[in-house]
Structure formats: structure tokens, C-alpha cells
Image (cartoon, coloured by chain):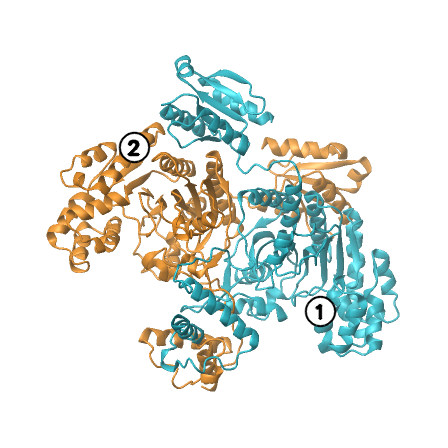
Chain colours: A orange, B cyan
Amino acid sequence: MATLGLACVRLCAGLMGRRASPWLRPLRCLSGMTVSQIDEEVAKLLELKARLGGDDGKQMFVLKTPKGTRDYNPKQMAIREKVFNIIISCFKRHGAETIDTPVFELKETLMGKYGEDSKLIYDLKDQGGELLSLRYDLTVPFARYLAMNKITNIKRYHIAKVYRRDNPAMTRGRYREFYQCDFDIAGQYDPMIPDAECLKIVYEILSELDLGDFRIKVNDRRILDGMFAVCGVPDEKFRTVCSTVDKLDKMAWEDVKTEMMNEKGLSEDVADQIGKYVSMQGGLDLAERLLQDPKLSQNKQACAGLTDMKQLFGYLQLFQVTDKVVFDLSLARGLDYYTGVIYEAVLCQTLQPPTPAAAEQDGAVPGDEAGVSVGSVAGGGRYDGLVGMFDPKGRKVPCVGVSIGIERIFSIMEQKAEMSAEKIRTTETQVLVASAQKNLLEERLKLSAELWNAGIKAEVLYKKNPKLLTQLQHCEETGIPLVAILGEQELKDGVVKLRNVANREEVDVSRADLVEEIKKRTSES
Amino acid sequence: MATLGLACVRLCAGLMGRRASPWLRPLRCLSGMTVSQIDEEVAKLLELKARLGGDDGKQMFVLKTPKGTRDYNPKQMAIREKVFNIIISCFKRHGAETIDTPVFELKETLMGKYGEDSKLIYDLKDQGGELLSLRYDLTVPFARYLAMNKITNIKRYHIAKVYRRDNPAMTRGRYREFYQCDFDIAGQYDPMIPDAECLKIVYEILSELDLGDFRIKVNDRRILDGMFAVCGVPDEKFRTVCSTVDKLDKMAWEDVKTEMMNEKGLSEDVADQIGKYVSMQGGLDLAERLLQDPKLSQNKQACAGLTDMKQLFGYLQLFQVTDKVVFDLSLARGLDYYTGVIYEAVLCQTLQPPTPAAAEQDGAVPGDEAGVSVGSVAGGGRYDGLVGMFDPKGRKVPCVGVSIGIERIFSIMEQKAEMSAEKIRTTETQVLVASAQKNLLEERLKLSAELWNAGIKAEVLYKKNPKLLTQLQHCEETGIPLVAILGEQELKDGVVKLRNVANREEVDVSRADLVEEIKKRTSES
């Protein structure tokens, strides 16, 4: 108990900040805590105790990554590289530049941009100097970048990690540290042309990634607001009712309706009117029909949104992507900053159920998620007001963009890779420099340097006298297609024995021709 | 003043942590502060006051990135991409896999690994849950990864940002957020073979980056320790004297000697003996000579280091890199975890002096740094004990690696780019889809989609009726080489007018041949 007592004093000092000593009062520092806070502190103390050696004084390490984060092993990196290549190629095909911003921003830069989700922002400890927070998305840093550099038009992509202290569900690809791949178009342009290109990009990427069928749901903040207005929702309840509507992809209408009435205080009549609208799905036809809707057509906001929606579908037809795009009045994305069109892409297939062990790690009830839907893999919309929030004079820069949520896509690709018979190579080595006899290390190193200098991807085992079998096994295991074998005789003859690992064929190649021969053989395969 | 008073109360609450209210005493909370702490708090209060509207109540924003960090604009990203490609190609040429780890680690993972530099670690705020810190380098996360996954041999590279709360000097490429490009070889191998490959890699990368002449200094922790021992430095002073020796690249010997005597408490005789050794530079010959040194040869540690050094230079000769590698007894890298060979690459050229404005931003005295040396651009060494620190049973995994410090290289490349006449393209767009007449937006969008679907990098202006001149100017500005021009006549004839932006030549190309023609033309250039 002495250890625990000491730990408590230290912990209280920690809780009270950097210069705590003058007012340190261990006995009082637990006042005002909730039960769950106490549980949390007890858990921390016990972990500390364990680390200090526990009851038997043996040192213990906690060998793990932080909650909600993961390492990527070489195989996962190979998959990640493949996915990124497809996405980046698409962004470049559409003429985008790229930028990068710091992983943290001034805390105030992020404040007031995310509504209720602000509680999920990671703050850095105040160690003197500025107050900092890890970025929550790439959109707000982008807007800050535009305002700071007075840029009024740009088409850029940005691929980087973002951070959210959310409840992780890693088997479904939901992490606290995750990649976003953002493409945004800033500038004052004719309506819906850049918006349509964003949807075309989502279409191209999801098609190329070959993840099965998908749908891109589209709606408009102004249509939602207009709909709430004509249904009789008071202005101040728009956002909160919106977040209830947003649950329609996971909850049945009846439950959503109950929440609207019981938690959001709407009358049954108002809820039913909303229910009628949010069940509507369609395309150009639906936009046209709603423009004739006796109630909705009376609302200016809704009409503006519907007119743009019509225009958007016109462009999408030219882009030949309307087979996957649905105008869906139930789509209501959470973020505060959207001002016009919003969209979200969902995969139609479901993920394989995770292994019970993996599910348990996530804190899920085993058997609970058989064939879980991975949910949205991309989303975005128009945010014409965000840059203006950073401009001292409030000058607006209209923006529209899309964010590809890559972790869920990784999860699917990893599952596919695991189930497939094909072996993923994690290196690109073309040839192993080997020897069948002893005392040839120096010759192996010399030949390796020759090959490296000629741009050949080559490896050599770091042993003085490795067995030939060991060297060949290394090739089999890592997929190296060729072996350059040196021996006394070969050195005398000025040749190298080049072996094809797959069919075991060996030919002598003159040292002068070796580089060309390796290039020829590896470009063929 | 009312505002300032309120801010003070809030600030104190902030300093005291999350549950501060029961013991909040504004009048006492400034006790125990140093003058610089008070200055810092005053600055924070004044910033807060400014944000709250200052004296005239006008809202103000602080539009900046956090201290010591930067955005990368598209041009800088183009340079970054070029540098990364060279580095990654080299790592892959040497058969490396890649991994990734989270940007933050459990705080305890980083504790006890960096000696005095630990104070530079960024901690995350305790928001409940685990205590986290931003990674300080990629080596400790790598060691954690090996121990956690029980990996005993791997050759991997890792390119990612690391974080240090250091004093930034951005004009010289010293940031608080910066990239490291690490290559490491873990495993039990014959001595100095992987170590030699690491140096070969540094040599290849610095040669390919074409940054002018460079030197790679090499030394060994065991030679340093042996040298201190035979010179009469007490064991417990090895590390601190080591950090004084490390200053020899920035300070004259006389000043280093003074520090050894006055601050580290060495006698003049001991200092002079050290001085004799640390002035020595050479290669294989120096290692051989020191193995005969009457004092050093009596020290077991030093002999082991010198024997390995001899071996290393033998391999470096086979790799043909000894023209740039120097065995330098004054090299003493700071990090605690090195156990054997250490090395550091420095560029021989100097950076252009920064503009006075940029220097001032860094807090430097203008005129102070004419032709500043960029210092070390790569460093590394052997750390055989680090993985064992994470293993519950202390099992060791020998490791050697190198880290390329890319920000200083970026600084040089950016300067070179600025001074060069060559324009850097920030997009890869091959063709702009344009029209000379009105009302052809739909045709432009249709053709763009055709080109995108065929893998052509194409742009189209987001205006209904852009002027042809505007479209051509966009190509000039962004370096797009081709324009596909649509007009009523071309549409009737089933052709597109393909214009070469550089020489203004135009030819009609049939719509069916357009993709092939664009591919042909852009692969030529």
C-alpha cells in the first residue's frame, strides 16, 4: 500500500498541472469526481503499480500501440501502397496539386468547426507556448491554409492521417488514427461543375479499387433545411433533428421517429411529414418532381438546392456515372460546415464477420456482427463558408471536396488478400547474390555493389559463409526471382551462374552482360 | 482590465488541471514562477486578450501554423516527392520492406530512451485513458514493434514525421515537426556487414541527390568509451564528456577544452589527452595505428571497436565508398541507445544566407548566419540493446540503421529550385479540354470524361463559357503541354483540334485517335 499511496500523490500532482506543489492537498484532490472518473483513476493507479513492479516487484512492460491505433506490417504496407497508387493516380488524372500541413494546429483553429464532435479532438499537453490540437480532418487545415496564403482558387489533394478520440471498432476499420485522402476544389465557378467532378472521382476510385458494387448518395443541406422548415421544425432544432435523420442508415424509421418525438420534442405530425420526405430516393426525376411539390416549392432554400441538384444530375449523365448515384433525402452528414450539396459513398457488400478474438479486442460482443456493413467509404460536400471563418474580413472562398476513408477499404483489401492464394511480395528485390562455396563474402559484396550501382535491386546475406540452401530458401520465402551464384570456377571464367528460382534453370552469363540479362528477365515477368 | 482579470482566472484554472475549482486561488497561483515563465504567461494572456477583441473589441484571428512547423505548398511538395522517390528507390534497391507505426506511443514506451533530450518530447493532454507522447524518432517505435511482434530479423525502411520541442531554426531546415527516412537492419549477423551496407546507402542517396560534396564521419561508442577510460575520465562522466566532445563540429577545441575543465570538472591533463585523440582522422590506416597505441590497445572496449572499424573499412573498400568516409574520433552522437559504430554525414557546401526577414522570423540576429553550414543530413549507428529494453525477458535483437534528415535537404533543394530558371510543374496534366465557342460546356465535359476513362490526365475549366485566351493562359501558367479544342465544326467533322502549347501548332485529330495521339505526344516530351 505504500507504493500505491506514493503513486496517488504523484498522480494528484499530475492532475493539478505543472506547478502544483504550493497547493498540493492529496486528501482533498478526489473531491468532485464522478464514479467513472474514480474508476478511471483507480485503473491508472493499478497500471502504474504493475509497472512499478506489482506486488512481487518484477518489472513489467506494456507492449502495445495506443488504443485505437495500429502498426502496419510490410504486407499491410504493400496493400496500402497499392490503394494509395490508385487514389493518387486518379487525383493527378484530374489535375490536382498536393499540399501538406502539420499534424497539429493551434487549438483555436479547430475550435467551433465540428459541432458536438469537438469533444473527440486530441489536445496536446500545455508544455509552455501555444495550445495545440491534433488535426481532426484535412478540411479545416485546408481552409486555414487558403485563408493564410490568400489563395482563392486551387485544386489540391492531401493524403494524411487524422485523429479522433472516438470509440474504436478496429475490425470494421474504425480507428483513432486513420488516413484521409482528400480532394478539394476551391474557387468561384459556375454551379455544380466542380461538384460533379468530385462525384466522378469517387466513382472512378471505387470502381478501380474493385470492392464490389457501391452507391453514392447525394443530398443538399439547403434541401434538408427547406424540408425541415416546411414540415414545421423550429429553426433552432434543424441541426439536432438533422443528426437524428442521419441515423436512418443504421436505424429503422420507427426508431428514428420515436427519437424525434421523445428526445427532440417534435410532434407526431411533424415527424410523419419528415418521414414522408426522407423515404424518397431517385435521380433527376425526383429533383424535378420535388420542384413541383406544393410545400417544398414554396421554400426558397429548397428550390435553390433542387435546381442545383437537377443541374448536378445533368453533368453526372455526361460523366456517365448516374448508374451509381442516388438522390437520397435521408442523407444528412454531421459536420457543421457544409452549406450545399453533400454526398456519401457506401459499399453494397458486407465484410466477413471478424474472428471472435478480434471482435473481443474491440470490446464487441462475439457473434454480434456477422457480415457487418463497412458503411461509408467516402463523403464530402460543399462548404462555402469555412474559409471565410479564417479571413479577418470574412472573405469567402467557395469550396467543394471529397474525402476517401481509406481504413475501411484497407480492411476489405486485407481480408481479400488473406483469402486469396496469391502471395504478396513485400520487397522488390530482383536478384540475390549468392555463393556455393566458402570464403567468397568479399566477391559477393563486390558483385552486389556492381549491381546496386547499375540500379539493380539486389540482396546479399549478411553471413560470411551461408549455405547455398539457406540462400535459395530466402529467395523462395521472399519471392526473389533470380540468384546470381558465384564460385571459384565462375570467377576464373569471368561469368556468373544465373539461376531462375521458379524453374531452377541455371545459365552462365558473362559478368559484362549480367546487368542487361537481369533487367531483361525481370521486365519480362 | 476586466477582460484581463477574467482571462487570468481562466488561465489559472487551465494550469491547475481538469478539476481545479475546489482549490482555485487566483492570488496564489503565480507563486514559484520564474521570470521567463511569467513572461510566457503574460504573452499568453495578451494573445488571449487580442483574440477576445483587444481594447476595441474587434475579433482577431491568429492565422498561423504552430511554432516550428510549416505547410508545404504544391511546389515544395513537388520537390519533396522527388527527394522521397530517390530515397525510397535506394531503400528498395537494397531489399528493404516498409512498415508504419502510429504518430503517438504510450508515454512509457519513450521514457528512458533519449537521455537529456527527453524534455523535448511532446506529450498529449491527459483526456482520460492512456498517457501518450508524439514519437521523437522512428528508432524507438521500430524497437517496440520488433519486441511486440517478436521479430528477430528484418530489413525495413520507415519514412514519417517525428516531433521535438526544440528551438526551431527554420531557415536552416530545423523544425519541430520533421521527416525522418530510416533504414534499419535487425538480426544476428556476421560483424560489420549490415553496418557497411548502411553507409553504402547513405553514400548512394547523397550522391544521387546531387547536393555537392559530402563526408561521412564514422566512429564507435566503444572506441569513445575506451578513449575516455585510458585518458582518466571517471566512468560516470563518460556521457556528459561525450556530449561536450560532440560540440567539436561547432566549437573550437580551446572552447571545448574549457567546458571540459570548468563545467565537467576534468583536469587539464585529462582534457589534453582527450584533445590528442579527438583531433585524429583517417581510415583503415588510423584504425591499424590505434590498435598499436600503447594506451588504447590496453583497453578491451577500444580494441573491439578498432577491430570492427578495420573490418568495416575493408567492406567499404569493396563497396568503393572510402573516398567520402572518414574515421573521426571526435564524432560522438548524443542518443543514449548506441552501442557500437556511429556515423553522421555532413555536406561540405554551405547554404545561402537566408533573407533578413526569414532569419528574423527564426529569432536569429540578422547578418549572423552568412553562408551557414546545414550540418548533418544523415546519421545513425548500432543499437544492440534497445529492443531488449522492450522484451520482458530482455532478449536482445542486434540492430544497425541510418536516418536521413530530409528537411535540411529540402531547404537546399528549394533554394536551388528558386535560383534555377527551370519552372517546377505541380500537376501532371497532359491536356486541357477547351472550346473556342460558347455553349460547349456539355461537349467539353463529355470529352473530359472520355479522356479520364482512357487514363489521360485532363483538365477542363469550371466555367460555362470561358474565353479561349483564358484557357490557353491556364496551360501556360501550369505547364500543360496540349489543348484539345472543340468547336461546332470539329464536332460536325468528328475531330478535335489538338494544339501544342509550346509552338502553337494545331492539327485536327479524329476523335477515335485522340487518346493514342495524346499518349504518343506526352511520352515523347
Task: Give x and y (percent) for residue B516.
Answer: 51, 21
Q: Are marks 1 and 2 in contact (CB under 8 Å)?
A: no
Who's the residue at 30% across and 30% down the image? A314
Amino acid at circle 1: Ser
Q: Is residue A328 above or below residue A42?
A: above
Residue on which disc 2 sits: A311
Crowd tier of the residue under label 1, counting other residues whose Cα lies within 10 Å: few below 14, some 14–19, many 20 or above:
some
* Residue A327 or residue B54, whichever sits in front: B54
Image-based side of B314 in relation to B15, left or right: right
Regarding residue A362, the answer to whether it shows in the image is: no
* Residue A356 or residue A402, whichever sits in front: A402
Q: Is residue B306 above or below residue A321?
A: below
Q: Residue furthest left?
A: A269
Q: Residue furthest front?
A: B56
Amino acid at circle 2: Gln
Image-based side of B31 in relation to B260, left or right: left
Q: Quadrant of the N terminus of chain A?
A: bottom left
The chain under label 2 reads: A
The chain under label 1 reads: B
Residue on which disc 1 sits: B243
Who's the residue at 75% across and 73% down the image? B259
Q: Alpha-carbon distance for marks 1 and 2?
A: 68 Å
Foreground disc of the pair 1, 2 = 2
The image quadrant that residue A15 belongs to is bottom left
* Residue A50 or residue B48, whichever sits in front: B48
Task: Give x and y (percent) for residue A263.
Answer: 19, 60
